[in-house]
Image (tube, rainbow, N blue to C red):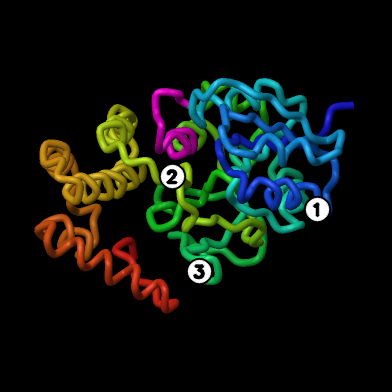
Amino acid sequence: MAPFFSVVIPLYNKEKYIQATIESVLNQTFLDFEIIVVNDGSTDNSQIILKSFENTKIKIYTIKNHGVSYARNYGIEKASGQYIALFDADDFWYENHLSEFKKLINCFPDAGLYCNNYNIYYKKNIKRKTVFNFNYNNSCLLVNDFFSASIIDSVAWTSATAFSKEKFMSIGGFDTNFINGQDTDLWIRFALQYSVCFNPNITASYNKFIDKSLSKNENNKLRYELVNKFKKEEKDNASLKLFMDINRYSVALRSKIHNQSEIYKKLKKEIDFSNLNYKQKLLLYLPKHLIVPIRKLQQFLIKNNIFFTAYS
């Protein structure tokens, strides 16, 4: 009998974290799942650690390194579960993660994207709760406007999302052209076509501090392509335009810091500045020699459990 969930884990050189990741899945209170690990050409001891688990729930596929989008698509193709729960090999689930997804699916069986709440760890012992741009209480709910809701923290984060394999395939899966931002691209396509629902219970932790995290690749040319991929849809969707302008702001700032002035100038022309707050407008116009120390100050404050952001 097919499991309810297939947990898909792309793996590339995460020997320090993969054991805790697998254990956090095996410790779930909801047990109707399989684990699909796609070893994307790891060159460290990740595979050895994987093979130390003697559990029939775990299926390991080893492929040549093609990147995380390809690995996730490959794992989902091999999955036999009705629903897919994504999990990156350097993040962590609490034991209620899959049971809370099951509850959310029971509440909204026709939804496209299922999102659990999560914590963000900036250092091993320094975390903050997510901040979303919509009101919610303790109940599962449909998110009326995913794009507006996600302009501070994203309602959908890779290791805290689930969806049916059928609906994933219907929107074309992960775009393998993107080496970063591929998850954001997928959430946009889900939200344009299907309803998105949210469970406010915190069930996972995003370990933002880990070196070589999938989200830390620096390629602003590809980021530029991503933030302009949905130009046609933006014309008739003000919330999507807002969401994409916030992302354009982020890429523009990255481009300025990395001396990519051509990308910075193009993005600045494409942003509707009414979609930015005063802090974002100020940072966008500040010279690089002032932005860099501000970012260093932000990192110092984070180490002291003080958080400030230009997104709110």
Choose the circle earlier in sequence order: 2 or 1: 1
Frontmost residue, 17 versus 225: 17
The image quarter in which residue 35 lies = top right
Frontmost residue, 131 versus 238: 131
Instruction: Give the residue type at disc 1.
Output: Asn
**Mark 2 and mark 1 residues within 8 Å of each other at the beta carbon:** no
Choose the circle earlier in sequence order: 2 or 3: 3
Residue neighbourhood size for the residue with mark 3, other residues' Cα within 10 Å, grouped as few (<14), some (14–19), many (≥20)? some
Residue bearing the label numbered 1: 27
Choose the circle earlier in sequence order: 3 or 1: 1
Secondary element under disc 1, as helix, strand or loop, is loop
Residue bearing the label numbered 3: 128
The image quarter in which residue 293 lies = bottom left
User: Is residue 87 rendered magenta in the image?
Assistant: no
Q: Which mark is residue 205?
A: none
- Image quarter where the C terminus lies is bottom left
Residue at 65%, 24% in the rendered image: 62
Residue bearing the label numbered 2: 215
Give how far across and how far down residue 145 sits, in percent: 46, 48
Residue at 51%, 71% in the rendered image: 126
Q: Is residue 107 left or right of residue 39?
A: right
Give how far across and how far down residue 238 sits, in percent: 31, 43
For marks 2 and 3, give the CA distance. 18 Å
